[in-house]
Image (cartoon, rainbow, N blue to C red):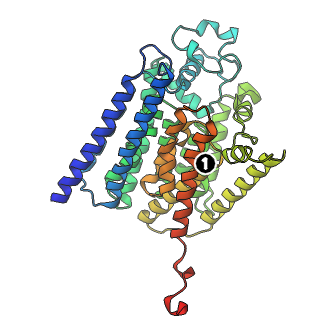
Amino acid sequence: MIRARRAEWSLLALGGGILVLTLAALSLHVTGSIWVGTVPRKDAVVALMLASGMLYAAAVALVVRRPVPPKLLALVLAIAVALRVALLLAPPFMSSDIYRYVWDGRVQAAGINPYLHVPADAALQGLRDATVFPRINRADYAHTIYPPAAQLIFAAVARVSDSVTAMKCAMLLLEACGILAVLRMLALARMPAARVLIYAWNPLALWAVAGDGHIDGAMIGLLGLAIWAAVRQRGGLAGALLGAAILTKFLPIAVLPALWRRWDWKLPTCGAAVIVALYACYAGAGWQVLGFLPAYTHEEGFSGSGFWLLATLGHFVKLPMWAGAAYILAAACILACAAGAMVFGAQPRTEADRVRLIGDRVCVLAAATTAAMSAHYPWYFSWLALPACFSVRPAVLWLSAAPMLLYSDPWHDEILLQTAVFLPAIVLAAFEAWRRLPNHLAVPAERRA
């Protein structure tokens, strides 16, 4: 009883601390500004976010290492809701992406294919306003980058309300579906329900979804449901949900091998069918349905210079022209080998084992893919906290929160900040791999003698 009360008060203090730090960060926003307002204020916001990350780490350690009474779930969820409400009511100021979501929804509500025109096109002049249009990034040269499932979400929200708050609410509702799926899977795995805070209290996920309303919230919700369907061995449903998640944000394609049971073709078949059907909804745009994606990969340096490892090595030695292609090939081969080992590896028989194993495999593939692509934006890492609820890997937990550093650049050195994110993750992953080495590799004491 005393231990349970101590855990309750500890969680209340940690959750309350995260809420106070979040409110303090929100108070630094200059009213009316599209971003925080000044560089020092932005750096202060990031510092408060990182401080909340330290409290979050302590809360994760508490629910993972100690028995947590089931009644604490209500406390965990209450704080999670309070954090989201606080961020929902504030305007987005760490990213302006949501204004493009609202714009794409508005364009579709007017009966226009969103892939056909850039926002600044004269054909869309009648849709412009003083609130949304001036805040759209890349408005004069970039067609929308968001794939069809995301576009259908934007269109649905626009039919209800053409506002930023409505869009944020939609992302939170879809995210809630993922959280509910996590709770259900924790019950199937006989894990403490309070472990849902690994995602629900994650500061990066909070600011990305509730604060700035990123489409990642919808992707996380669909992915959570897809994992649940895979655990229940409902391959067709899992494939359909995964296909929708992929066409919300392309990243979830990396975890397909973690969800697929070999020789069960329902998952890939249904996933492919959903992808084809969703693209067909916007087929009138032809090849323009790919939007800004091809140019975006070049803009972000995904041909070579944008990868952290190559950019870091480039500071010390001159890299050959083929370095980028070699890096992509090597990363693809490593990920393919890991995927193959998962598909042809052990197949769990019970639902509890499936939750643990699928969750762990999703963790590995999601983290490895996001790190390999050296995502430049913090919210790209927010999805890593979802599978971490079932598989507590230190490197993945680090990557699910530490990229908050990327919101700021006080020394005008992006590589330095990326190093602060990726290098500790590599060290943690290496240490964990060493600890997981099979016991038979150790030399028995009698042989050493």
Quarter residue 340 falls in: bottom right
Residue drawn at point x = 67 percent, y = 13 percent: 120
Quadrant where the N terminus is found in the figure? bottom left
Residue at figure coordinates x 69%, y 16% from the top left: 140
Classify mark 1: helix, strand or loop.
Answer: helix
Q: Amino acid at mark 1?
A: Ala
Query: In the picture, residue 447 is in which quadrant?
Result: bottom right
Identify whether 45 is placed above or below 345: above
Is residue 36 among what the camera can see?
Answer: yes
Instruction: Relative to 78, say whether 100 is above or below.
Output: above
Residue placed furthest toward the left: 1
Q: Nearer the viewer, residue 386 or 419?
A: 419
Query: Where's residue 380, x and y in %?
Result: 56, 39
Q: Position of residue 406 (x, y in %)?
A: 55, 36
At x 72% / y 58%, what residue is drawn? 333
Question: How busy is the neighbourhood of tag 1: few (under 14 within 10 Å), some, or many (20 plus)?
Answer: many
Q: Position of residue 55 (x, y in %)?
A: 35, 45
Determine which residue is flagged by label 1: 371
In this rendering, would 295 be left or right of 375?
right
Q: Image check: 181 left or right of 293?
A: left
Q: Is residue 71 visible?
A: no
